[in-house]
Image: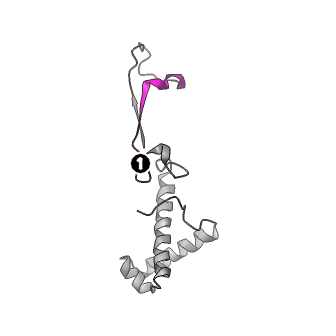
Amino acid sequence: MVTLLAARPESASSNYGRAFSDDASEFYHYEDTGCEASDSCLDCPLPQCRYDDPAWYQRNRRLASDFRMLHIMQQESLSLEETAERFSVTVRTVFRVMQRCREATMQGNPTGEARLRAA
């Protein structure tokens, strides 16, 4: 996340407090603190900032987690009940996960936005 801190320029007089134009950007200090997806906004692997569209980020983060659950279920040949117990969810939730993964795959998003890591 980029934090924008306004600094009062020495040459500012009565214009202080008004919106600065783009040519006054040297009076701003940008602190690049990143987020859980990346330590720095400039090095972020996401196609858009998580703060610009939080719903998009949550949806794709959940989808990445769903694909991780489905992958483990298939890799270890777990039953629905075993998967539910392993991930501390209900069997119905496992069905929902399978449905969301199926829909995402049919829409051409087989990795659930591969650049997102399930945390």
Q: Please say if 49 is above or below 4.
A: below
Using the image as rendered, state which of residue 43 and residue 47 is in the foreground.
43
Say which residue appears at 49% left-offset and 59% top-offset: 116
Using the image as rendered, state which of residue 68 and residue 22 is in the foreground.
68
Amino acid bearing label 1: Asp
Report if residue 15 lies within the magenta region.
yes
Q: For residue 18, which quarter of the picture?
A: top left
Instruction: Evaluate whether residue 19 shows in this view.
Output: no
Label 1 Cα crowd, 10 Å radius (few <14 / some 14-19 / many 20+): few
Residue range in magenta is 12-36
Residue 89 location, x and y as percent? 38, 77
Q: For residue 87, which quarter of the picture?
A: bottom left
Q: Where does the N terminus fall, quadrant-wise?
A: top left
Report if residue 14 lies within the magenta region.
yes
Q: Where does the C terminus fall, quadrant-wise?
A: bottom left
Residue 75 location, x and y as percent? 49, 80
98 on left or right of 30: right
Q: Please say if 14 is above or below 30.
A: above
Say which residue appears at 54% left-offset and 71% top-offset: 100
Say which residue appears at 49% left-offset and 49% top-offset: 44
Residue 106 location, x and y as percent? 63, 71
Residue 25 location, x and y as percent? 49, 26
Q: Please say if 117 is above or below 94.
A: above
The residue that mark 1 highlights is 39
Q: Secondary structure at mark 1?
A: loop
Using the image as rendered, state which of residue 10 and residue 91 is in the foreground.
10
Instruction: Evaluate whether residue 116 shows in this view.
Output: yes
Q: How many marks?
A: 1
